Image (spheres, rainbow, N blue to C red):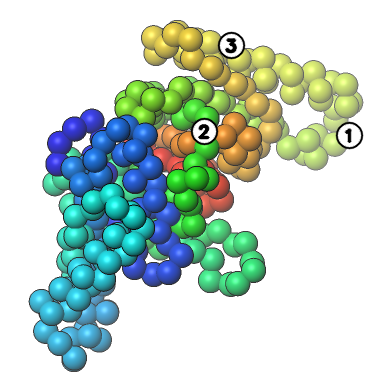
Amino acid sequence: MSGPLQLTLGLDLRPQTTGAIQYALWLCKAANLQPSGHVQAVHVVEPAAIVELIRHADEPTILGAFKRRGKEICDEVARGAHLHAPEVFGGDVVEILEDRARDHGATALIVSRRASTKAGVAFPRLGSVARRLLRRLKLPILIVPPDLLPSTVGEGPVVVAVDFSESSERALAWARTIADTIGRKLRLVHVADMPDQLGYAGLLQSERWEQLANEIVDRGRERMAEFIKDQGLVDVESTVVRGSVLPMLADFAQTSKACLVVTGSGHHGLLHRVIVPSVASETAAMSTVAVAVVP
């Protein structure tokens, strides 16, 4: 594959998880690119499943059957747009997806978020594969709602969450390339996280609390202006909103009709990400908009 947008698609064969395929096709259409040259699907059969199935057929037969089913799903979703048959492997899902994405020279590895398992209950979850990918974060990971359709992708900008760190700079650089490729504007957002007002009960009058909150927002606006200048951006929209990053970022993306949210990984190492869910991963778990997390 070659070109400005290369997507490795982690193909999930379970029902109601075609959002990643739909979004990959939408990105290609927005960029005026043929999916066959810019999307490569990969499906990985986990060892436990291989052990169970090997009693009925040899491994090449098993992998061939999954490849045929994967191609059927891609064709059903693509509706005329050509996608190559998926690559199919047996082994560790996360390691193989990462390796194949690197070999493809992928702009991002795109996967669907896990579909709800309870009928009528909205309980968004990342799923174990998406969560492990975000913990390791070897390359940009794009998490898509499982039921996303091209018609539901927002008509608005690529929203970039910034906290003025080096992580935000990397996220912005990646987002600029994507926005240019798909012909969308950038919009930067900083969520001015407020201290817990309950913790100050009886210590600050409400008027002083409001003054403090306004000072935090004003400082956020000053830092945003400095950040935009330092990054050499011209005529870019920016917003500083007051509140808690969760769920404010996901809500802002939805109300902005964003087509994509891009965020950095933060300052935390692998051990911290294993123990404490990050803002990026939790936003990806709840967002109705596709979320890209950039290392």
Q: How far apart are marks 1 and 2 (CA)?
A: 46 Å
Most foreground residue, 232 or 204: 232
Q: How far apart are marks 2 and 3 (CA)?
A: 29 Å
Q: Callout 1, which amino acid? A: Gly
Q: Distance between the residues labelled 3 and 1?
A: 30 Å
Most foreground residue, 81 or 11: 81
Task: Give coordinates of residue 228: x percent, y percent.
Answer: 47, 13
Q: Callout 3, which amino acid? A: Glu
For disc 1, the neighbor class at 10 Å (few under 14, some 14 to 19, many from 20) is: few
For the residues carrying marks 3 and 1, which lies nearer the camera in this image?
3
At 13% from the left and 79% from the top, the residue drawn is 61
SS type, badge 3: helix
Is residue 8 visible to the viewer in this orientation of the structure?
no
Instruction: Please name the residue that numbered disc 2 is placed on.
Output: 155
For disc 3, the neighbor class at 10 Å (few under 14, some 14 to 19, many from 20) is: few
Pick the quarter of the image with the N terminus. Answer: top left
Q: Callout 2, which amino acid? A: Glu
SS type, badge 1: loop
Pick the quarter of the image with the C terminus. Answer: top left
For the residues carrying marks 1 and 2, which lies nearer the camera in this image?
2
Instruction: Please name the residue that numbered disc 3 is placed on.
Output: 222
Q: Earlier in the sequence, mark 2 or mark 3?
A: 2
Extreme-front residue of the structure: 80
Most foreground residue, 69 or 79: 79
The picture quadrant where one finds residue 122 is bottom right
Instruction: Specify whether 212 is left or right of 32.
Output: right
Instruction: Specify whether 270 is left or right of 50.
Output: right
For disc 2, the neighbor class at 10 Å (few under 14, some 14 to 19, many from 20) is: few
Task: Give coordinates of residue 195: x percent, y percent.
Answer: 70, 33
The picture quadrant where one finds residue 131 is bottom left
The picture quadrant where one finds residue 246 is top right
Instruction: Please name the residue that numbered disc 1 is placed on.
Output: 202
